[in-house]
Image (spheres, rainbow, N blue to C red):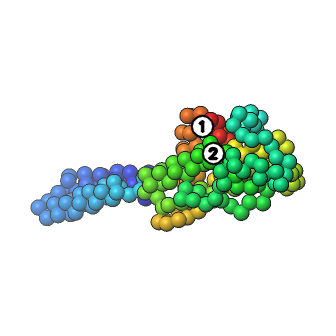
Amino acid sequence: MPLSRFFSLILHLEYVLQDFTMRATPSSPRKAFALLALLLILLCGCASNRKAVPENFPFKFADNNPHQVAGAKKYGIEPLDDRSQLNRVKKKLKHIEECEYYTVDPLTHSVPYLTPQAAKLLKDIGKGFQKKLRKHKMGKHKIIVTSVLRTKEDVKKLMKVNSNAVANSAHCRATTFDLSYTRFKHVEGNKEKAAKMKYLLGEVLSELREKNRCYVRYETKQTCLHITVAK
């Protein structure tokens, strides 16, 4: 039950109780007591109910591409021309695959590798997200990774179908990944609204950003959060 509706009901019951008190007769105390009992039941139900989560998204994530690329250069690899060069840097990178905290979409224009710092950031985002779900007594879900490391060849192909793609992409440094904010993988318990989970994911990213752990850009056309590790 929405909190606004709950408090309206409480106010209405208060007026009813006051009316019963003023008109109480020897035969009416039972009615007043019944309404008081109902009020207590509603209060207990509210205390045990799931905490309300806003569905709006007030977070202003606007770390643009030049800003993210500048950060990526500090911690990332040199851009690869194509995927044939991937073997020479694999030892420096972490392979990204589905785990307890996130899942990975089928990738068409990127490969599932990140620097160790970026891989840890991704894991911490997933852990923080699930912690907030538990706090609000919501069903378990995983965040979804939609894009990871891109080669220069991947970027050229992507630019033909994605107007947001740029040649000088932070994705080429293995420091950057995209997370969907409209889709989450349901694991168990209640299947929650994406809007509420998007808000919680925003909270996690905002907290990490305040700690200077990441750069974040909110992308509307691709409905994703573009994230680069910052340290």
What's the residue type where badge 1 is placed?
Answer: Arg
Observer-nearest residue: 153 or 51?
A: 153
Give the labeled residue for mark 2. 116
Q: Which quadrant is home to the N terminus?
A: bottom left
Observer-nearest residue: 3 or 158?
A: 158
Disc nearest the viewer among 2 and 1: 2
On the picture, is 176 further left or further right than 100? right
- Is residue 5 in view from this perspective? no
- Is residue 66 in view from this perspective? yes
Neighbourhood count class around disc 2 (C-alpha, 10 Å): few under 14, some 14–19, many 20 upward: some
What's the residue type where badge 2 is placed?
Answer: Pro
Q: Give the x, y percent position of residue 36.
A: 23, 57
Q: Secondary structure at mark 2?
A: helix
On the picture, is 195 further left or further right than 42? right
Q: Residue at x 65, y 51 (%)?
A: 94
Q: Give the x, y percent position of residue 19.
A: 25, 54
Q: Residue at x 52, y 51 (%)?
A: 127
First of labels 2, 1 by sequence position: 2
Q: CA distance from mark 2 to mark 1?
A: 13 Å
Neighbourhood count class around disc 1 (C-alpha, 10 Å): few under 14, some 14–19, many 20 upward: some
Q: Secondary structure at mark 1?
A: loop
Q: Which of the numbered marks, if any, corresponds to residue 213?
A: 1
Q: Residue at x 50, y 61 (%)?
A: 140
Q: Residue at x 31, y 55 (%)?
A: 43
Question: Farthest left residue?
Answer: 26
Residues at circles 2 and 1 in contact by the CB criterion of under 8 Å = no
Q: Give the x, y percent position of residue 10.
A: 34, 53
Observer-nearest residue: 27 or 101?
A: 101
* Picture layout, residue 169 above or below residue 29: above
